[in-house]
Image: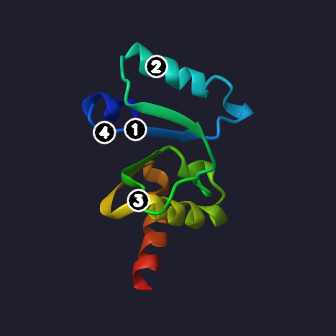
Amino acid sequence: MTIACAKGNPQGEMVGIDRWGKEYASFNKSLCESNAAAEEVKNTCFLSGNAVLLDFPDESFDAVTSNYVYHNIARADKQALLMETLRVLKKRRCFCHSRPDVSYTVWEYAKCLWSG
């Protein structure tokens, strides 16, 4: 789901999701598309979306990455975000979360899911 993964895995399809809000005016969908084109990465698409309400069927993805997302989500919504991530992720596949300062929170939610 990142350009680095797409370039190293040309047989896979990568999907980038972001809401591209006004507060991030310098980071937008067209910039992502331009970066992919500059790197000659053709197996990507970029979509606007809400990470808590993804427009994909259950178990759509082999892997999901989240880079610097959870710190932008209100504490009450972090569990909803994790649940939605796990919903679109195929069973026994990989979820990679990158943001050490909130990893503990994500781990606590995950333990609650497993304990039932």
Nearest the eye: 81 or 33? 33
Q: Which residue is mark 2?
A: 35
| 2 or 4: mark nearer the eye | 4
Q: Tell me the amino acid under the disc marked 1.
A: Met
Are the residues flagged by discs 2 and 3 in contact, CB closer than 8 Å? Answer: no
Q: Which residue is mark 3?
A: 89
Q: Earlier in the sequence, mark 1 or mark 2?
A: 1
Q: CA distance from mark 3 to mark 1?
A: 14 Å
Above or below, comparing residue 58 to residue 22 in the picture: below
Q: Earlier in the sequence, mark 3 or mark 1?
A: 1
Q: Tell me the amino acid under the disc marked 2.
A: Asn
Q: CA distance from mark 4 to mark 3?
A: 15 Å
> Which residue is found at the position 47% from the left and 78% from the top?
112
Q: Tell me the amino acid under the disc marked 3.
A: Leu
Q: Quadrant of the C terminus?
A: bottom left
Q: Earlier in the sequence, mark 2 or mark 4?
A: 4
